[in-house]
Image (tube, rainbow, N blue to C red):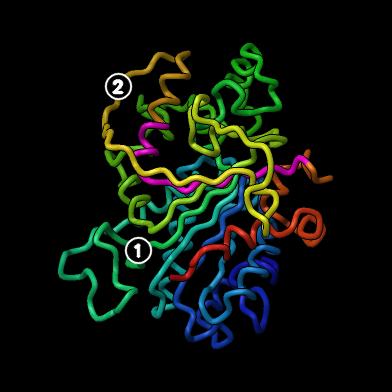
């Protein structure tokens, strides 16, 4: 395990997980930020952004780049990865008893993994535990994540609606025949994770995992997501050949907004922003869905996830030399990308009252 993985501190760079309780970590830092990479990724994917974030908010946050699902381990399935990440988070918290808050920032499939993990770590709270002598940092009445106040759940180009719907994987050119063939063979390339993404898994004759993850019928997936103060979905409006705009922004086709130019002077690649309140629709049904009726299944995912409020930030790199690698560019993996597109990662980490 390299020295550049794990927890970042201003004084000594990235610390090993075993050293999270080290004296090098600021004693005042009480906010654990978990950064989760995508498929076939590693801790290196978030290293640059974590570095910038920790420098900007030193003494406030402990930034940890997840390291238990790297490379080929990302092919084992969203649920298996979620279980590993949950164990990792529990270990980190046990080594840092002064922690009070937790946030997740996840790229691509990592967003689905993080959603599974918080379902495992969700804890309900008694009324007597809410707003104790902990001031503004008292626990949320909606629950905690492993005993910590849930602050921000941020996903970056995450396929929340899966990848098998029309144009959900742009490099398949929106051709129905090609998309159907892809759904049949994806497991040969991306194994169990591929089945989860294309909604073709039927473990123990259950509905697809992503459908189950918009319900509280097994783990408390939606209650855990609701516990966070903020839920933010960053999406590429184009040039992302891996994850389509609709699935990453949790919208129907008819809800995709028109955009023309930047709406943020400081971060010119942001072309649209919106806040939507949660709907009142509720469902905990395992109704059978026809195998080829992708629209019906996608609608179930949209309805389930939009029961909660979301901030949506739509990004375009159409004027950047890195536009054709938008799926990676939005994550800002290195100094070159940073200089080319400004630090989009810094934007989604620091533009709001992130540590409130």
Seen at 70% across and 52% down, the residue is 268
Closer to us: 298 or 118: 298
Vertical placement of residue 334 versus 312, above or below: below
The residue identified by callout 2 is 287
* Mark found first going from the N terminus, 2 or 1: 1
- Number of other residues with Cα within 10 Å of mark 2, as a class: few under 14, some 14 to 19, many 20 or more: few
Seen at 76% across and 53% down, the residue is 341
The residue identified by callout 1 is 146
Seen at 43% across and 65% down, the residue is 102
Closer to us: 150 or 114: 150
Estimate the x, y position of residue 212 in percent, counting from the top left.
36, 35
Seen at 53% across and 39% down, the residue is 249
Quarter of the image with the C terminus in it: bottom left
The boundaries of the magenta stretch are 302-318
- Does the rendering let one see residue 74? no
Closer to us: 21 or 73: 21
């Amino acid at each position: 395990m390299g020295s550049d993985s794990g927890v970042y501190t201003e004084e000594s760079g990235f610390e090993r997980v075993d050293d999270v309780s080290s004296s090098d970590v600021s004693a005042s830092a009480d906010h654990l930020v978990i950064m989760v990479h995508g498929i076939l990724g590693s801790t290196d994917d978030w290293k640059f952004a974590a570095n910038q974030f920790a420098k900007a908010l030193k003494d406030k946050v402990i930034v940890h780049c997840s390291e238990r699902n790297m490379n080929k381990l990302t092919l084992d399935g969203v649920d298996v990865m979620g279980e590993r990440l949950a164990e990792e988070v529990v270990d980190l918290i046990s080594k840092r008893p002064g922690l009070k808050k937790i946030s997740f920032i996840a790229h691509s499939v990592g967003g689905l993994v993080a959603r599974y993990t918080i379902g495992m770590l969700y804890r309900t709270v008694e009324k007597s535990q809410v707003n104790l002598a902990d001031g503004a940092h008292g626990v949320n009445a909606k629950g905690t994540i492993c005993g910590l106040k849930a602050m921000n759940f941020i996903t970056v180009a995450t396929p929340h609606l899966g990848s098998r719907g029309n144009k959900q994987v742009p490099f398949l050119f929106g051709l129905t025949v090609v998309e159907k063939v892809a759904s049949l063979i994806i497991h040969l390339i991306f194994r169990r994770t591929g089945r989860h993404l294309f909604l073709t898994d039927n473990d123990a004759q259950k509905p697809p995992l992503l459908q189950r993850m918009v319900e509280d019928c097994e783990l408390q997936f939606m209650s855990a997501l609701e516990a966070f103060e903020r839920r933010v979905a960053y999406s590429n409006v184009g040039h992302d050949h891996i994850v389509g705009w609709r699935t990453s922004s949790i919208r129907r086709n008819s809800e995709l907004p028109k955009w023309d130019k930047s709406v943020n002077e400081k971060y010119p690649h942001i072309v649209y922003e919106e806040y939507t309140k949660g709907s009142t629709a509720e469902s905990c049904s395992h109704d059978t869905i026809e195998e080829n009726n992708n629209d019906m299944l996608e609608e179930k995912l949209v309805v389930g996830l939009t029961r909660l409020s979301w901030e949506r930030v739509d990004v375009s790199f159409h004027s950047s030399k890195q536009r054709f690698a938008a799926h990676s560019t939005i994550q800002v993996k290195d100094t070159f990308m940073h200089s080319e597109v400004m630090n989009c990662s810094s934007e989604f980490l620091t533009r709001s009252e992130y540590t409130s």
